[in-house]
Amino acid sequence: MTKAQLGALDRVDPFLMDPIVDAMAVFNRQAPMALEIGFGMGQTLVHFAGCHPEWNCIGVDVYRPGIGSLVLQCEQQNIKNVRIVEADALSVLERLEDNSIELMMVFFPDPWPKKRHHKRRLVTPAFGTLASSKLNVGGRLLLA
């Protein structure tokens, strides 16, 4: 973790949200919701949020250097429509209200090629069912 990322973690509180909290209440506005699961270093979420300030954007990850990187980028680009949930993605999805997400992004989530690691994979039929229940009618799941 870089010094800048570590320093950003000291300032992460305004960006954090509890996964049990109503997401709309956290942003203090009604707006389309974008959710990125496993945002890595945060580039995609920051780019999306910067291009779509009218959206509420949530990133879910447990990778602390990535969380620090996302906070830094939001600060540097004055992005105010991003919140972070530091938790397991499935537990967050289970707590989100049904039909509450307009766009869900999951990019390259499963670096578990060995058979004994398959239980760690995020993308499963059960994930598909859960994710689809959280999407609005006409909502999109971007998966790569």
Image: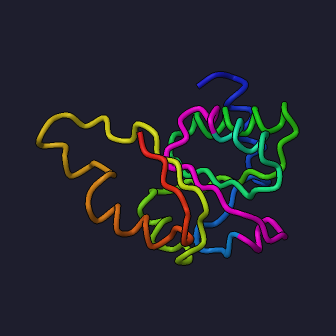
Percent position (x, y) of residue 50?
A: 79, 40
Q: How are the residues colored? A: rainbow
Q: Is residue 15 left or right of residue 130?
A: right
Q: Position of residue 59 (x, y in %)?
A: 61, 50
Q: In the rendering, at what x and y percent does residue 141 appear?
A: 48, 54
**Percent of width and height locating residue 97:** 56, 77
Residue at 68% x, 29% y is 5
Magenta residues span: 24-44
- Quadrant (top left/top right/bottom left/bottom right) for the C terminus: top left
| Residue in view at x 76 percent, y 33 percent | 72
Q: Is residue 69 above or below residue 15?
A: above
Give the residue displayed 28% in from the left and 65% down from the top. 126
Q: Is residue 84 left or right of residue 119?
A: right
Residue 31 falls in image quadrant? bottom right
Examine the structure image and report whether residue 29 is included in the region drawn in magenta. Answer: yes
Left or right of 46 on screen, residue 90 = left
Task: Decide which of 30, 64 is in the foreground and name it.
Answer: 30
